[in-house]
């Protein structure tokens, strides 16, 4: 099997215990909802996701048991974190401890976020 075709396969728990070297351009893009694309690389205890959000899209406030870090790659985002509003731009990193109440509204351009979760978001794998 060629390297290209191997990299076209989304990283899943079946590769646990093996080192991975991937490139976002070869990772499956999931269209999880209108205006939201997601790519995932899954490890044993953590995962990294790249999201693309359409302008003005709103992710409702929520919480989860996972620790999360979000890095803004492009675009501007209005985050709501435990009742506080924060504007984030490219290069900004936000940390959400487990059970932290948070949500976001994309501003007037496409937003690309890198989210890192630990433990792995099983709901992303099964949903």
Image (cartoon, rainbow, N blue to C red):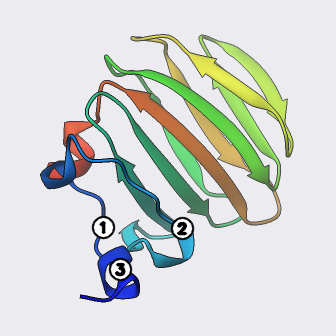
Q: Where is residue 39 in the image (x, y as percent from the top left)?
A: 44, 62
Please say whether residue 16 is visible from this viewpoint: yes
Q: Is residue 96 above or below residue 105?
A: above
Mark 3 or 2, nearer chain start: 3
CB-based contact (under 8 Å), mark 1 and mark 3: no
Q: How far apart are marks 2 and 1 (CA)?
A: 11 Å
Q: Give the structural element (helix, strand or loop) at label 2.
A: loop
Who's the residue at 41% across and 11% down the image?
Answer: 98
Q: Name the residue under label 2.
A: 23
Mark 2 or 1, nearer chain start: 1
Q: Where is residue 80 in the image (x, y as percent from the top left)?
A: 66, 25
Q: Give the structural element (helix, strand or loop) at label 1.
A: loop
Who's the residue at 84% across and 32% down the image?
Answer: 87
Q: How far apart are marks 3 and 2 (CA)?
A: 9 Å
Q: Distance between the residues labelled 1 and 3?
A: 6 Å
Q: Quadrant of residue 47?
A: top left
Q: Where is residue 34 in the image (x, y as percent from the top left)?
A: 45, 70
Q: Mark 1 points at which residue?
A: 10
Q: Quadrant of residue 70?
A: top right
Q: Mark 3 points at which residue?
A: 8
For residue 43, side relative to residue 80 (left or right): left
For residue 70, side relative to residue 44 (left or right): right
Q: Position of residue 101 (x, y in %)?
A: 49, 16
């Amino acid at each position: 099997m060629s390297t290209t075709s191997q990299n076209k396969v989304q990283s899943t728990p079946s590769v646990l215990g093996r080192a991975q070297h991937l490139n976002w351009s070869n990772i499956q893009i999931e269209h999880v909802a209108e205006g939201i694309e997601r790519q995932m690389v899954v490890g044993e205890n953590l995962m990294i996701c790249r999201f693309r959000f359409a302008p003005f899209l709103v992710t409702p406030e929520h919480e989860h048991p996972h620790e999360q870090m979000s890095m803004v790659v492009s675009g501007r985002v209005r985050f709501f974190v435990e009742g506080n509003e924060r504007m984030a731009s490219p290069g900004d990193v936000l940390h959400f401890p487990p059970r932290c109440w948070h949500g976001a509204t994309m501003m007037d351009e496409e937003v690309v976020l890198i989210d890192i979760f630990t433990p792995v978001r099983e709901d992303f794998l099964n949903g």
